[in-house]
Image (cartoon, grey):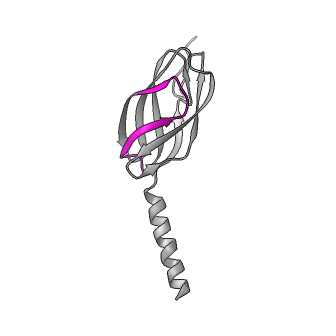
Amino acid sequence: MARRIAALLLIFAAAARGASPHLGGIDPPGVQCGVDTDVLLTGDHLQDARGLLIYSPGITVLSMTAVDNGKVRATLRVAGDSPLGEHEVRIWTATGVSDMLPLYVDSFRTWRARDRIIV
């Protein structure tokens, strides 16, 4: 009997975790002070995204759109006097709040991995 109860608890715990949002990446991982930047947030269970939780002053979300289950596009405005360095970000959905990921603020222009530099 105890084994059945334990098995049921494990099944329900796995189902509950399956619906929780998971934030796996932010592209680009850094943004420039005084500039509006489009970012792509990737992970799991993000289709019902409601907002971003940013635990630092000077970074605001101008717009946010869920692309699909694993992608959300957002436009962030970083104030010119925003503190430089690492800032913690979470995504908030109808089913919960994700784990934290760092977003870096710098004074230099941000380059995405897919951008090419032509000299």
How far from the left and from the top, in percent, is residue 97? 47, 47
Q: In this view, does 51 lie above or below 39?
A: below
Q: Please identify the residue farthest to the right as the structure is shown.
A: 85
Q: Nearer the viewer, residue 74 or 59?
A: 59
Above or below, 115 relative to 119: below
Residue 110 highlighted magenta (yes or no): no
Q: Which stretch appears magenta?
A: 45-61
Q: Position of residue 92 (x, y in %)?
A: 44, 43
Q: Which corner quadrant holds the C terminus?
A: top right
Q: Nearer the viewer, residue 46 or 56?
A: 56
Specify the farthest residue to the top: 119
Magenta stretch: includes residue 53: yes
Residue 63 or 44: which is nearer the viewer? 63
Query: In the picture shown, does residue 1 fall above or below 100?
Result: below
Say which of 25 and 12 sits in front: 12
Q: Which residue is drawn at 49% across and 66% down?
A: 14
In the picture provided, is 6 more to the left or to the right than 20?
Answer: right
Q: Residue at the spot x=48%, y=37% of the render? A: 53
